[in-house]
Image: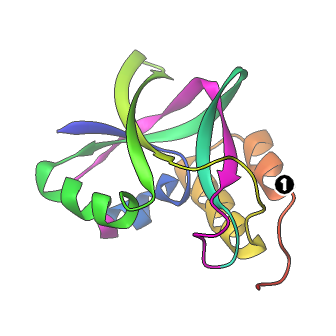
Amino acid sequence: MVLYAAYGSNLDPARMLVRCPHSPGRGTGWLPGWRLTFAGEEHGWDGALATVVEDDGSAVFIHLYDVAREDEAALDEWEIDLYRRVRVRVQTLEGAQLAWLYVLDTHEGGLPSASYLGIISEAAVAAGAPDDYVRQLRHRPCRSVSG
């Protein structure tokens, strides 16, 4: 098993169960020294895509999954065309854990669509993110209309 740290729509355990049925959730935690942002507006269906960037004063809520080998390829199919894998250290109630996550391989900037931001905030709720974290997600600037 490989430990994967999800921060976007993959925070949602139900979504991950469909994408990676052999990869159980292992709990939640924080990615200190990073912040959630958006980039790659030209690659999204109607806006910028979620990614993380290093930022000493921030932390990103994450959900950890033990990704089985048979699910790694499936997860890469969803992500690897635009993202690259990065190894990170996350903080959990059990202490620091090494994991990997996907980082968008483009410059930061652009607005996500309101619907995409809604998917991410609902995924955060499903993963048990703190209310203030979800509130910050829901109040981020976004595109209100596709196109």
**131 with respect to 102 (left or right):** right
Q: Secondary structure at mark 1?
A: loop
Please report the residue visible at 56 percent of the width from the left and 28 percent of the height from the top. Answer: 30
* Quadrant in the picture for residue 100: top left
* Front position in the image: 129 or 19: 19
Please report the residue visible at 71 percent of the width from the left and 68 percent of the height from the top. Answer: 118
Residue 40 horizontal/vertical position (percent): 62, 60
Indicate the amino acid at tag 1: Arg
* Front position in the image: 61 or 83: 83
Please report the residue visible at 60 percent of the width from the left and 71 percent of the height from the top. Answer: 44
Magenta stretch encompasses residue 40: yes
- Quarter of the image with the C terminus is bottom right
**50 with respect to 110 (left or right):** left
Please report the residue visible at 32 percent of the width from the left and 63 percent of the height from the top. Answer: 17
Magenta stretch encompasses residue 34: yes
Residue 5 horizontal/vertical position (percent): 42, 39
* Quadrant in the picture for residue 85: top left
Q: Which residues are magenta?
A: 18-45
* Front position in the image: 17 or 49: 49
Residue labelled with disc 1: 140
- Quarter of the image with the N terminus is top left
* In the rendered image, the vertical position of residue 2 relative to residue 84, given as above or below: above
Quick check: can you spot residue 130?
yes
* In the rendered image, the vertical position of residue 28 relative to residue 134, given as above or below: above
* Quadrant in the picture for residue 75: bottom left
Q: Residue furthest left?
A: 70
